[in-house]
Image: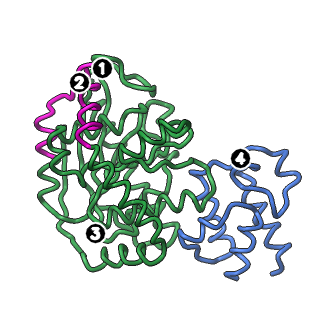
Amino acid sequence: MDRAEVMDRVVKILTPWVKDEAALAKVSMETNILEDLKVNSARLVDVVIAFEDDFDIEIADEDVDKVNTVGDAVNLISGKL
Amino acid sequence: MGQDVASGVEPRADRETVIRNAMRSDPGMVRRHARQRFVSMLAGPVWVGFSVLVMRFYFRYRIADVKRVRATYRRIRAESKAPLLICANHLTMVDSFLIAWALGSGSYWLSHPDELPWNTPEQTNFGRTRLQRFLIFVAKCIPITRGGAREDVGGVLERVKYLVARGETACIFPEAGRSRSGRVEESAAAWGVGRIVGAVPGCRVLCVYIRGRAQSSFGVAPAAGDTLDVALACIEPKSDTRGVRRSRDLAAQIVRQLIRMEEEYFDARK
């Protein structure tokens, strides 16, 4: 699976938790998940579990500390595929 | 109103691994922690005494059946040397002080300084000025920025894991912020607390439900002269899952315990 495909799936998974839909329309690898997309930080865990289910991977607590942007999520997931 | 379930599990060797790993991976954090612990302990007679005086005489708060609450806390402590994390519902910005006062007298905390819980207040509420930052440093606070950079939040969680594994205590609000509905909200459960509990072998959780009788919703502080009811329940959350899912599962167990305690609180007042 190439990074563009991972990116598409990451954005699709993020969509239900995004509060700023305008930011979603111009999403890029640099888009910050909490600050730009306004995803509730307490719900980040649900997003990560959705990543696990969708990509059939396991993500450790410490891995989540490295995820600030959409690109960070794509890199993390790509590294586990 | 109290209930408690004790656990005698004390896998000390594993806890020492947690401590050793922290010392190896972040020696700066370990040094900062030692420094703050020393300063807080040294200044304890001033800030602990002052806090108790303010709560007791300025705000005229009263803890209902305080002797029983403190005896229950001491019994839970005496039952096991396993690490203990305090998790409470969150309605006001002074809950941490009220919980500490409910669990022990000023003199108790001065003679058991490592049992006096560390706190993780929101940086934007308590760390705005240099004076505020100094005061929260002295008062055993590790400020956190909700929704801040994940590495910073992770750093705070790592420090709490380290200090709990050492046998110190922290008070965490699993809902992350004050309950906006005035009730414990399962949907607001943050997973960080589960991450701490899952990483410290044998970690027990002392769930504390605290509520002022005049308190109908969240606010800055309980009304002056209010009487606060306090219930305690000691649990040891377990989960067969792994990774992030495990942390969420453990956090959910803690929040559900707080919800049960809240239901008992309101049932008793019907």
What residue did someone put label 3 on?
A: B202
Q: Secondary structure at mark 4?
A: loop
User: Mark 3 or 2, which is nearer the eye?
Assistant: 2
What residue did someone put label 2 on?
A: B56
Q: At which x and y percent is residue B257?
A: 33, 49
Q: Is residue B4 left or right of residue B32?
A: left
User: Mark 1 or 4, which is nearer the eye?
Assistant: 1
Q: Is residue B258 left or right of residue A51?
A: left
Real-space CA distance between mark 3 and mark 1, rounded to the nearest whole angstrom:
38 Å
Q: At which x and y percent is residue B184?
A: 42, 39
Query: Between disc 3 and disc 2, whose residue precedes?
Result: 2
Q: At which x and y percent is residue B166?
A: 29, 66
Q: Secondary structure at mark 1?
A: loop
Q: Which mark is residue B168?
A: none
Mark 2 belongs to chain = B
What residue did someone put label 1 on?
A: B59
Q: Nearer the viewer, residue B27 or A54?
A: B27
The amino acid pointed to by label 2 is Arg
Residue drawn at (16%, 55%), measured in percent from left and top?
A: B77
Identify whether A9 is placed above or below A81.
above
The amino acid pointed to by label 1 is Phe
